[in-house]
Amino acid sequence: MKKDIHPEYREVVFQDISSDFSFLTRSTIRTDDTIQWEDGQEYPLVKVEISSASHPFYTGKQRVLSSGGRVDQFRRRYGAMAKGGRS
């Protein structure tokens, strides 16, 4: 195996900035920020905008849109204009 070509694999804390959720895992991501974790040790910190704690799919707050209703609404609004303008 070649030496000095692999990134450093270390423990890193990922913190969701939209909720008060963070977790410790291992990663090769590079960051300059650090945080003191629950065990008293300091780890590199990666801030993320969305995680399983704030994603609508995982929290059960996902909205499902009906595309069929939107097509009918479009046809009602603009269908009369399209028919009236043609010769």
Image (spheres, rainbow, N blue to C red):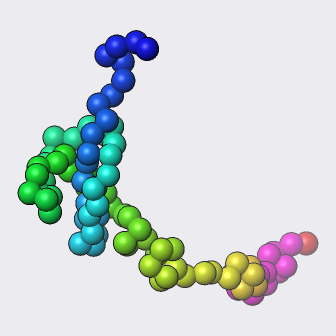
Give the residues in magenta: 73-86
Residue 6 in the figure: left or right of residue 41: right
Question: Residue at the top extreme?
Answer: 2
Find residue 3 and report its image quarter.
top left
Q: Is residue 11 left or right of residue 56?
A: left
Q: Position of residue 37 (x, y in %)?
A: 15, 58
> How far from the left and from the top, in percent, is residue 84?
82, 80
Quadrant holding the C terminus: bottom right
Q: Judge left or right: residue 51 versus residue 84.
A: left
**Quadrant placement of the N terminus:** top left
Residue at position x 20%, y 50% from top?
Answer: 45
Give the percent coordinates (x, y) of residue 9: 31, 35
Query: Residue at the spot x=36%, y=18% of the render?
Result: 5
**Which residue is depicted at the point 32% across and 61% down?**
49
Residue 74 seen: no
Queried whether the magenta region covers residue 84, the answer comes back as yes
Give the dominant element type of the magenta stretch: helix, strand or loop: helix
Count of numbered labels shown in the rendering = 0
Report if residue 85 lies within the magenta region. yes
Residue at image location 37% in from the left, 64% down from the top: 50
The answer to whether any part of residue 51 appears in the image is yes
Q: Is residue 59 above or below residue 76?
A: above
The picture places residue 40, in percent across and down from the top left corner, at 8, 57
